[in-house]
Amino acid sequence: MVLGGGTAGELVATGLARAGRDVALVENRLVGGESRYFACVPSKSLLLSARRGETWEMAVARRDALTGHRADERIVARMAEEGVTVLRGRGQVTGPGRIEVDDAEHGFDDLVLCTGSEPVIPPVDGLADVPLWTSDGALSVPDLPRRLVVLGGGPVGCELAQVYAAFGSQVAVVEASGRLLTAEAPFAGEVLADALRRMGVDLRLGVDLSHVERKESGLRLWLSDGGTLDADRILVAAGRRPRVEGLGLETLGVATSPGHGVPVDETCRVPSSSGDVWAAGDVTGVARTAHAARYQARLVLANLLGEHRAADYRAIPRVVYTTPTVYSVGISPKQAEELGIDLLTAGYDLAATVRAAVEADERGRVELYADRSRGLLIGAAAAGLYAEEWMSEIALAIRAETPLSVLTDVVHAFPTYGESVEVPLRELAGRL
């Protein structure tokens, strides 16, 4: 029984069915998940349309075509052909080996939790009483607000701020911390902040939203520093939390708490009294991206089919698909400080590459991070055009623990942004 039909659930269920297992998948919304309909696919489509200079109407039409107009019949039919039984409705575990789906009870031997995550709505006075979007709404409706306030300067908030600003909305971003992308290297948020300001985005950093009220001409937002913002729509991008409540997991002895994912071991097995529970994707709270969900789903699938595979999360990329792109992988400077790692940092400005001159865009920088005690590359960050493509070799180097002596001997094509890693790699090798 696979509970949740998103990125991970679809992959696990289809894989098990192809292997001859009897599989049912429970989904109360759309089979295919948030990524396909309300997150990765529509947001990247709109960002591409913005770069191409398309009209809003063209961008929306393209977005909706790519998401299948948010209909899942073809996917469900394909899964049925593979041998998966799709159960529409809400699933709730009622005890070991038993699950209820809209009042109908079913049995199972193994349970795989793939219920994903849900947006967090901050407890701000008046916010619940005014029109607001989460990313679901912002990436599915045809509306183009004249004035949009984005709450949150993380990856989702930054991507959607750029989308709507590119198509003509007057956009403001409110972020309580002093900078964008607080989990990543400071330079990455600074490069992106500069890009957004150049588009006319009003960045209110280091302030909280105090309360919201309706006005005749829209909404008035009061900030903690005494400032105000007027808006026609508010987009809440203040983070997401694993969807664990109301699943009945306590009947299996699975301990959960609001805001936290289900605990998993290195094989993605969930500690439980029944011993037959697994989890993959956002519900684990480990690495909340579609590609991390696919990775965990492959682990679950392999382990359920008799192999033994353990997860290694050292090189899961984190990407913000704005222009310029922000790419991070491995340990960030903030994480290194928290873990007490003696970090060596070396960087290089993209403006020094010939490719930047060819592209007529000198924005961006790359930084590489090495663990002094181990002499290995353990993290990296980049902000620049197409960084999601040319930084993949660094993810491989971190995952494979490739010696710096090998990395410094790699030849990059000219002229490419990939050349920008050569100087910091040589610097790190020399310092080590």
Image: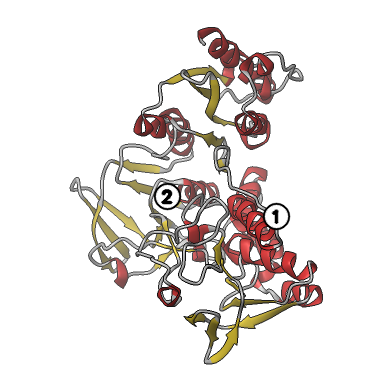
Q: Position of residue 169 (x, y in %)?
A: 47, 53
Q: Residue 214 falls in which quadrant of the image?
A: bottom left
Q: Is residue 245 placed above or below 419 in the rendered structure?
A: below
Crowdedness of circle 2 by 10 Å Cα count: few (<14), some, many (20+)? Answer: many
Question: What residue is at 31 percent from the left and 56 percent from the top?
Answer: 230
The N terminus lies in quadrant: bottom right
Q: Is residue 332 placed above or below 310 in the rendered structure?
A: above
Residue 171 marker: 2
Crowdedness of circle 1 by 10 Å Cα count: few (<14), some, many (20+)? Answer: few
Q: Is residue 304 placed above or below 79 in the rendered structure?
A: above
Q: Residue furthest left?
A: 226
Residue 70 marker: none
Question: What residue is at 67 percent from the left and 25 percent from the top?
Answer: 359
* Residue underneath mark 1: 307
Q: Residue furthest right?
A: 81
Kindly tell me whether residue 171 is visible in this rendering: yes
Q: Position of residue 42 (x, y in %)?
A: 62, 58
Image marks 1 and 2: residues in contact by CB distance under 8 Å: no
Tell which of 124 and 161 is nearer to you: 124
